[in-house]
Image (tube, helix red, strand yellow):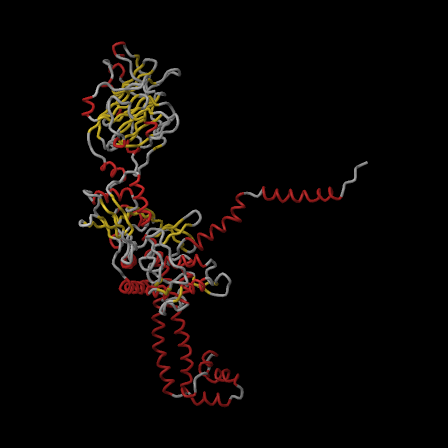
Amino acid sequence: MAKKKSPAEGAKKKTNPNVMGLHAQVLEQPITQTLELNYMPYAMSVIVSRAIPEIDGFKPSHRKLLYTMYQMKLLSGPRTKSANVVGATMKLNPHGDAAIYDTMVRLSRGYGALLHPLVDSKGNFGKVYSRDMAWAASRYTEVRLDAICQELFRDIDQDAVDFVPNYDGKLQEPTLLPTTFPNVLVAANQGIAVGMASNLCGFNLGEVCEAAIARMKNPEADLLAILKAPDFSTGGQLLYDQKALEDIYRTGRGSVKLRAKWNYSKSENLIEVTEIPYSTTVEAIIDKVAELIKAGKIREISDMRDETGLDGLKIAIDLKRGTDPDKLMAKLFSLTPLQDSFSCNFNILIAGMPRVMGVGEILDEWTAWRMDCVRRRTYHICKKKEDKLHLLRGLKQILLDIDKAIAIIRETEEEAEVVPNLMIGFGIDQIQAEYVADIRLRNINKEYILKRVEEVSTLEEEIADLQDLMNSPKRIQKVIITELQQVKKKHDTPRRTEIIYEYENLSAEKAAAQEAPDYPVHVFLSQEGYFKKITPQSLRMSGEQKYKEGDGPYLHWEGSNRDELLVFTDRQQCYKTRLSDFDDSKASLLGDYLPTKLGMDPEEKVVWACCPGDYSAHLLFFFENGKAARVELGAYQTQTRRKKLTTAYSDKSPLVSALVLSEDTEMAVCSTEGRCVVFHTASLTPKSTRSTQGVNIMTLKPKYKVEWAKPLSETTIVNAPRYRARSLPIAGALLKEEDRGETQLSLL
């Protein structure tokens, strides 16, 4: 007999499947479905409705703020408290007041982020070039629209752009602002969306207008000749790189180098920096210089102060006696944000789709959009004139018999019948009859009616002209060109960022090299990785080289104290440093232990080292498996001060030997079997990939490997023709006794 279950057990059994079913549904939901339902709508909202600017040059937050200020009559009226504007903007922008005020700050004249500020501000709005200078609260500051905003709202009330309901459907807001100039290229803008970003630099307004005009007249016009380079509100100097600018103008991606403006006061022995790159701040510059002073990399500065005040930005740098200001600034440019890069990414929403475009494409898209705005504006004006013409034509009918019109109105018993009776009596429609019926009694005279009727012919001519304008793209372009010329005349300002066509662009590495004293040195590297740099004078006075027990000499060459040093390890890594980073040593000392000096990984060992010079030579690598690789030294050259390069050579087989190849020569390669191959390095094709496996030189039996490889001139081989290879790979010939010479040093 089965045991009777308790109610609790029965309830538990009934609920468990439901719980398990719920968990199963959550756990088994495909990740693609989760992304599609939860992540993609958010990502698209950020891209389309928040972070990426559109063809008018604004993000939605900018547009909502400016339109609210326009509705508040702040285009021509007095300033109002910023808090009032922020509160009113919240009717269109469903975000907190802090986010809206931050947007207003960036558009303000006081903050200085734009070449042509859109908000005329009063009070403390901070500064774009300061990280720590906070702006005042919105209750303390005052704003109104700047004069240039007339160009943003000129056609806003003439149906030039679409309007959509706000987030609660109670108000209407424009989808775009009908800017009469390519504001998208004038106003600097940046945004980070999901999976993409946008970074638009500013250009000079006058140059942009001229470029737009030239592009309309000739699609093949040379924009770089007109739109010389980006222009930034913080001024500074732009280092002109024609190729980089051509790439930006063509693709919409690239970077430009900016440099601070400075002057030297000889009487006070100080440098004054008055303009800095747009992409950095005063605090970032001072912090970096202080860091370099603490690290001992800059010794020429005695004091540095931020003297920014009412007169604008100023960084004062006091120099020590005897300091060359030009050399110091060259060093600061290479090591601090006083010279910085601005990365361009012209990503713009076109019809709701993000597109990265060059300057020419942006001007084409703006022109097409602006032509549509002008066409819509023209249609709106034409429609109003047509409506007026329609009314006047009805009035013209009344001119035929004014007395009849008066009689119809007087004899009509009910007011509601006046309009129908006029329609019947004169053959006019309801709109015309309503217009006639609303004429005041004092205006029912021939003089008034004749004056109105005279407008008919004028209106007909104007309407015909407007219709012709709507149907003529060339005429619309002429209208746009005229507007652009007017904008340039009214609002153009001189360039703020100076273009430097000729300059010396020192990298950080070159600056460090030039700073180090230049004198000849002898370099010694032991088998265990001990490194010594000895001057010729010290070497002449020294005795034998000192090594640890079990260690011995490995590499020795002559060079300069400014030379770079490449150190290769058994883990296929290359450490980059300079001979000037090592103290001068003596033969009686062990020297610096490279794994410790260079901060190598635990148990990592040095296998080879060289000075690359100007990186024009090649490197030859020989591996135990019989392969050799010829790699361009340029593959190890870096623009930044990188200390370590991974995958410095192939890891498929242990490295046996390496050398710098300045010119082609004959090499001798010997295996542990006692076979030797002599070949010319011209048969090896140079590769730009550091980790290339190379090509086979020797065919080896399974138990043998390459033992050494050296230039033929450095071996004891006397019967070279016996080992010379006609084609590669080859097994090689057994070494004769007279060719063996002394025991060769292998690289372990």
Residue nearer the viewer, 305 or 248: 305
Q: Is residue 511 above or below residue 444?
A: above
The answer to whether residue 22 is left or right of residue 158 is: right
The quarter of the picture where residue 566 lies is top left
Total of numbered circles in the picture? Answer: 0
Quadrant containing the C terminus in the rendered view: top left
The quarter of the picture where residue 66 lies is bottom left
Q: Is residue 539 above or below residue 478?
A: above
Quadrant containing the N terminus in the rendered view: top right
Residue 624, given in percent of the width and then of the height, sits at: 35, 20
Residue 602, given in percent of the width and then of the height, sits at: 39, 27
Residue nearer the viewer, 526 or 294: 294
Q: Is residue 214 above or below residue 530?
A: below
Residue nearer the viewer, 494 or 362: 494
Residue 302, given in percent of the width and then of the height, sits at: 25, 44
What residue sits 43% from the left and 65% below the top? Answer: 84
Residue lying farthest to the top in this orientation: 737
The quarter of the picture where residue 447 lies is bottom left
What residue sits 33% from the left and 65% below the top? Answer: 147
Asked if residue 746 shows in the view, the reply is yes
The answer to whether residue 185 is left or right of residue 514 is: right
The answer to whether residue 164 is left or right of residue 665 is: right
The answer to whether residue 308 is left or right of residue 379 is: left
Residue 498, given in percent of the width and then of the height, sits at: 24, 52
